[in-house]
Amino acid sequence: MSFSSFPSTCFSGFIALLIILLFQDTCHAKETTDYCAPSSCGKLENISYPFRLKGDNRKNCGDQRYELACESNVTVLYLSPGRYYVQAINYGNYTIRLVDPGVHNQESDCSSVPHNFASKNSFYSYFNPYVSDQKVDGIYGNDQWIQLLTPIIYLSCTNPVLDDARYVDTSPCIRGNSDSKGHTYAILEQLDAKDLKVGCKVKLIALTFWEWWVGKSPNNVSYTDIHKGLVYGFELSWMGGVCEKYCGKSLHAPSILPAT
């Protein structure tokens, strides 16, 4: 039987069946992709891949390793050092800005201190403290990297430290021990063991954004400056890992920060 003699009703049925099959394939393709409509929580209105909100049961929405919680209308990320509030997500350079709950919205109260003890190496499971500064044709290269984190080290000392400008006195914001005989200091950037003064102990390590301090000397900052940096928060990158699949190029960010 020639095509011309094929009954019109059969031809119409064949077309209808073909449309149904194509529609089913298209729906299945959408269900198996990692894309879904963005979510929102509080001031964050575009939470999308690789992030997802906890409790979002939509199939294949985001990556479970980057799951966020929405608590009292605040976006929260749980990491190994503790709980952090999400201030912003930058999908242009693959960074997320976090702030410790202890200093969140506490710029006017310099006595507030972070709750979490964290270091530069606390986040390597799914994040990196580096980001590429190269972007060519929408693809990040892997030859130039800048650090995102600067540590702030809190120390309790039995005696005043007067011979090292890096030891920033935290008073009157934070005072010493309850017996008023101790002294509390904060140091911006890394502290080598040889530079730890006799009678001083590390009490807390917090993090701030590296670029906040560009152009400033660690020897010439006030504790008010340091506290403002804590309130701003710090950034982490999700380059590498998930980005290797979705950013157009395999990325291998450095796993060890340079000595400071």
Image: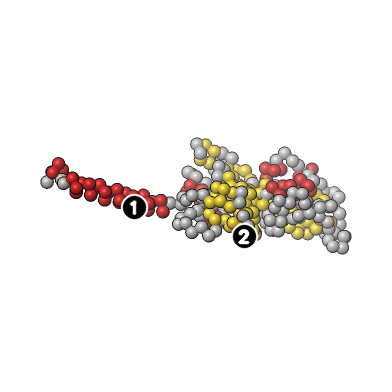
Q: Secondary structure at mark 1?
A: helix
Q: Is residue 166 left or right of residue 255?
A: right
Pointer 2 with pointer 1, Cβ within 8 A: no
Q: Which mark is residue 80?
A: 2
> Is residue 205 in view?
no
Q: Which mark is residue 15?
A: none
In the rendered image, the residue lying farthest to the left is 1
- Residue 219 in the image: x percent, y percent? 79, 44
- Residue 78 in the image: x percent, y percent? 61, 58
- Residue 229 in the image: x percent, y percent? 72, 47
> Is residue 146 in view?
yes
In the foreground, 70 or 113: 70
Front: mark 2 or 1: 1
Residue shown at 68% from the left, 56% from the top: 101
Amino acid tagged 1: Gln
Residue shown at 33% from the left, 50% from the top: 23
* Quadrant in the picture for residue 225: top right
Amino acid tagged 2: Ser
Residue shown at 60% from the left, 43% from the top: 145
In the rendered image, the residue lying farthest to the top is 137
Instruction: Give the residue pinned by disc 1.
Output: 24
Reading the chain from its start, which is encountered first: label 2 or label 1?
1
Q: Is residue 46 left or right of residue 116?
A: left
In the rendered image, the residue lying farthest to the front is 9
- Which color scheme did the rendering employ for the protein? secondary structure
Residue shown at 85% from the left, 49% from the top: 163
In the foreground, 252 or 63: 63
Dot 2 alpha-carbon crowd within 10 angstroms: few under 14, some 14 to 19, many 20 or more: few
